[in-house]
Amino acid sequence: MRLFPTSSRRSSNWNSTSAASAWWLVLVAFSFLACSQADAQGEESPAASSKTVIGPRNVYLYDGAQALLNQDAERGVALTLKGLDIAQGAREKKIAHSNLCAGYLMLKNTVRALEHCNTVIELDPKYWRAYNNRALVYLEMQRYDESEADIARGQELRPDSTKLKIAKGMLLDETDPVRERIEVDERRSALQDDPDVDD
């Protein structure tokens, strides 16, 4: 797969090693939970407002996201699974499943990645990043029509998303690749190399 700059449909070719290491760039901006307990729950209760939590409330989710950003998918998934076990509220669960979708995709475990993407969309059908991630899972599974549909849905929700533009370019690279056409005119060199040609 090849990445493309947002200014054009596609340009430079990436080798497969570069593409594999570039997945994390296109996936969810891994969510961090460095917020107060009240922020994480989305409500301000009197008990919550009387305390301030320094640092992330769910350390496993935070550390898992950091590991994924550092391209350590195995560690990131393991930590995120621990974070999911103790997740409080819909927001933490959504973040955990979203990051697990990304992490499993980085590990090329598309079946598990798809399960977590679907869970995120069930929890929040308007979360555009989940459609971006699921589109990439479908792309990896060569389910191109479903990938295209998820990109379109994501773009309805977030029209200016660079990540969705990159995902669309990756899809186009798979379904409608740009072929370079190079013509080499060898007539002149052939004439120069031919001993029967008089100067």
Image (cartoon, rainbow, N blue to C red):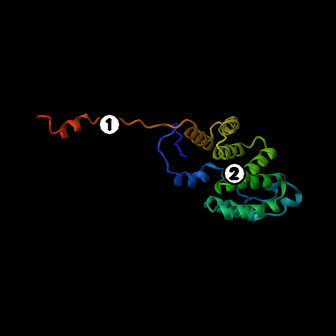
Is there a contact, CB below 8 Å, between mark 2 and mark 1? no
So how many labels did they put on this image? Answer: 2
Q: Is residue 89 left or right of residue 128?
A: right
112, 29: nearer the viewer:
112
- Residue 112: image location, x then y, percent: 73, 53
- Say what secondary structure mark 1 lies in: loop
Examine the rendering and report whether any part of residue 9 can be seen. yes
Residue 86, position as x, y percentages in the image: 82, 62
**Neighbourhood count class around disc 2 (C-alpha, 10 Å): few under 14, some 14–19, many 20 upward:** many
Seen from the viewer's position, the closer of residues 170 and 160 is 170
| Label at residue 141 | none
Amino acid type of the residue tagged 2 in the rendering: Thr
Q: Is residue 177 left or right of residue 85?
A: left
Residue 57 makes an appearance in the image: no
Residue that sits furthest to the front in the current view: 196
Outermost residue toward the left in this view: 199
Asked which quadrant contains residue 189, the reply is top left
Q: Residues within 10 Å of mark 1 (few under 14, many from 20)?
A: few
Name the side, left or right, on which 138 lies relative to 15. right
Give whichever of 46, 92 is nearer the camera.
Answer: 92
Residue at image location 55% in from the left, 46% down from the top: 1
The residue that mark 2 highlights is: 110
Tell me the amino acid under the disc marked 1. Val
Residue 60 percent coordinates (x, y): 74, 64
Instruction: Choose top left, top right, bottom left or bottom right for residue 153.
Output: top right
Residue in the image at 67% along x and 63% along y:
74
Q: For the C terminus, give its image quadrant.
A: top left
* Residues at marks 2 and 1, CA–CA distance in whole angstroms: 43 Å
Residue that numbered label 1 is attached to:
184
Give the secondary structure at mark 2. helix
